[in-house]
Image (tube, rainbow, N blue to C red):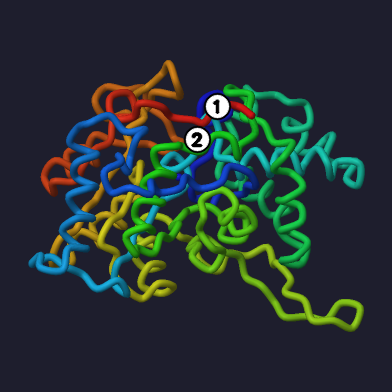
């Protein structure tokens, strides 16, 4: 959860990889209750739905009151709380790793899919199959300890660059969503990231970027083995998937790793459908929200819902839009609902 580079990759192949960061602190909640808790949101149905849900579930004499221990909110990551075009950040990380590892693999110069990556051939990359991406992810994300992988992610983040927006991936976090997370936490909600990307890719930067501790990250993961290296125990990443946290996997992952049904869920694509279904099927006040990328000026415009350009990265289908209408989920228009999208460059 692909433009020139977008086409041959889908969220499932990238999932075999697993996404990173390290900047941008979470937005502080206003000290005064009179202050607007969501200042980067324009007044409208989306903003009011969020405030209404929080008010209903935190007001003691409300029939929808929920004890703090059960106040849980879940957020998809790619395309929901940070930019995912023209490629998922974890895909950019994988391609960069190929260039870094190339001197140790001279055979790659004559072997696909590595040859096209090293030649920076975007036309060829756009035609990569799922098998091609799986091969790239396998060689760049396994054969090392979990600690070594986290170090690679942390080292890459500051020098990462979105190919179109020309900013580090950690700069491309949506300010309105940071405000929502802070608003929810100020009202005793626990906020979780539930992503199709790699759990161990997100953990290193989640707290610094979103204010979410690493233990509240639910994501795709590889098989890990307990081994000894230089006499010390290590967890080694194997070239095999353990859990894919996308589509139906998101509902399963929420139950497996959180153990409670959320009250509110934010997504942006077909891969988030089941997460919103599972969340809003519970009793009492519930809220499902989907971010629609319809702002080609400040970010990107893609769907294909509502006649927007088609994409294989974070696709928001018309069937998902129709389901949102039938289930009364709230669709957030980036163009109309957000007064600003990104923080100013530092």
Find residue 57 and report its image quarter: bottom left
The C terminus: image quadrant: top right
Q: CA distance from mark 1 to mark 2?
A: 15 Å
Q: Is residue 312 left or right of residue 33?
A: right
- The residue under the point 39% across, 53% down is 75
- The residue under the point 41% across, 74% down is 256
Q: Is residue 214 left or right of residue 141?
A: left
- The residue under the point 61% across, 65% down is 222
Residue 76: give x, y in percent of width and height: 41, 50
Q: Which residue is mark 2?
A: 83
User: Which label belongs to residue 344?
Assistant: 1
| Residue 333 drawn above or below residue 307 | below
Residue 254: give x, y in percent of width and height: 38, 67
User: Which label belongs to residue 197?
Assistant: none
156 and 305: which one is in front? 156
Q: Is residue 200 left or right of residue 291?
A: right
Question: Which of the two labelled residues, at mark 1 and mark 2, occupies the earlier sequence position?
Answer: 2
Do tag 1 and tag 2 residues touch (Cβ < 8 Å)? no
Q: Is residue 216 left or right of residue 159?
A: left
Residue 281: give x, y in percent of width and height: 17, 63
Q: Residue furthest top?
A: 297
Residue mark closest to the camera, 1 vs 2: 1
Find residue 261 and report its image quarter: bottom left
- The residue under the point 17% across, 50% down is 52
123 and 244: which one is in front? 244
Residue 24: give x, y in percent of width and height: 58, 42
249 and 39: which one is in front? 39
Mark 2: give few (<14), some (14-19) or many (20+) Cα within 10 Å: many
225 and 280: which one is in front? 280
Is residue 24 visible in the rendered image? The answer is yes
For mark 1, give the secondary structure: loop
């Amino acid at each position: 959860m692909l433009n020139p580079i977008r086409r041959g990759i889908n969220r499932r192949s990238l999932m075999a990889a697993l996404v990173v960061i390290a900047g941008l602190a979470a937005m502080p909640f206003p000290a005064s209750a009179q202050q607007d808790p969501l200042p980067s949101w324009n007044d409208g149905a989306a903003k009011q739905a969020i405030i209404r849900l929080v008010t209903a579930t935190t007001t003691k004499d409300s029939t929808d009151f929920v004890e703090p221990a059960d106040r849980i909110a879940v957020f998809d990551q790619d395309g929901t709380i940070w930019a995912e075009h023209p490629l998922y950040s974890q895909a950019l990380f994988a391609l960069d790793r190929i260039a870094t590892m190339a001197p140790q693999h001279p055979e790659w110069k004559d072997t696909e899919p590595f040859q096209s990556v090293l030649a920076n051939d975007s036309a060829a990359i756009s035609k990569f199959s799922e098998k091609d991406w799986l091969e790239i992810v396998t060689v760049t994300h396994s054969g090392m300890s979990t600690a070594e992988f986290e170090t690679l992610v942390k080292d890459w983040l500051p020098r990462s660059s979105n190919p179109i927006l020309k900013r580090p991936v950690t700069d491309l976090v949506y300010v309105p969503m940071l405000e929502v997370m802070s608003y929810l936490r100020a009202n005793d909600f626990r906020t979780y990231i539930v992503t199709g990307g790699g759990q161990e890719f997100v953990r290193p930067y989640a707290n610094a970027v979103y204010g979410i501790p690493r233990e509240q990250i639910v994501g795709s993961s590889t098989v890990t083995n307990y081994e000894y290296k230089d006499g010390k125990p290590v967890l080694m990443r194997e070239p095999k998937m353990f859990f894919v946290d996308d589509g139906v996997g998101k509902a399963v992952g929420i139950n497996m790793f959180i153990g409670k049904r959320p009250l509110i869920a934010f997504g942006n694509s077909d891969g988030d459908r089941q997460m919103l279904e599972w969340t809003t099927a519970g009793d009492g006040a519930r809220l499902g929200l989907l971010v629609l990328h319809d702002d080609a000026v400040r970010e990107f415009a893609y769907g294909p819902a509502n006649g927007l350009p088609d994409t294989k990265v974070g696709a928001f289908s018309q069937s998902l839009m129709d389901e949102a209408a039938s289930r009364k989920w709230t669709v957030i228009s980036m163009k109309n609902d957000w007064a600003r999208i990104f923080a100013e460059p530092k």
